[in-house]
Image: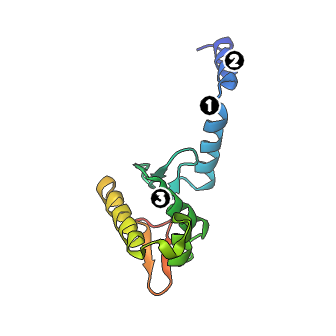
Amino acid sequence: MNAKERGAASRSLRKGPGVAVLEADLAQRQASGGDRWHLDAHARRLVSPKRVVISLSMPERRVLDTLMAAAGAPVGREALIAVLADDVYDFDPHRLDMLIHRLRRKIGEHTSEPPPLLTARGKGFLFDVERQY
């Protein structure tokens, strides 16, 4: 491809609606160091350090958003239930336990990496974005 063709290709890429999405994804990868667990900014997907993509349900995404926003600090069960239910008193806490269990199992089925979703006994749950082998 010569310089003229590269320029034309570059201009056509800039016109496309997906360029902003691609730039945001690239910025997120660079910011995360590329070797950490992260959430896809534009979809309900979790991406492992080895680039394995795991599809998430909306409740799973909400829980992971909350855990990852805490930057490795434990998040209490009540706070996680609050992102899942309008009425926290009408929510069965065992549903949260099952969601965490299914999410860990899903991560294990898709990747050989240790699940970064940890239990902080007496405090709640945390997500260790840098957890590797």
Locate the C terminus and report the quarter of the image it occupies.
bottom left
Q: Residue 59 carries which label?
A: 3
Give the spatial CA distance, label 3 vs label 1. 27 Å
Q: Which mark is residue 68?
A: none
Instruction: Evaluate whether residue 51 shows in this view.
Output: yes
22 shown above or below 63: above
Question: Which label's residue is closer to the chain start, 1 or 2?
Answer: 2
Question: Which label's residue is closer to the chain start, 3 or 2?
Answer: 2
Question: What kind of residue is marked 3?
Answer: Pro
Residue labelled with disc 1: 18
For label 3, the SS is helix
Residue pictured at 44% horizontal, 55% vertical: 48
Callout 3 touching callout 2 (CB < 8 Å): no
Residue 59 located left or right of residue 5: left
Question: What kind of residue is marked 1?
Answer: Gly
Question: What kind of residue is marked 2?
Answer: Gly
Question: Which label's residue is closer to the chain start, 3 or 1?
Answer: 1
Residue 95 x/y as whole percent? 39, 69
For label 1, the SS is loop
Residue pictured at 61% horizontal, 65% vertical: 69
Instruction: Evaluate whether residue 35 shows in this view.
Output: no
Residue 66 x/y as whole percent? 57, 65
Residue 33 x/y as whole percent? 57, 55
Residue labelled with disc 2: 7
Callout 3 touching callout 1 (CB < 8 Å): no
Locate the N terminus and report the quarter of the image it occupies.
top right
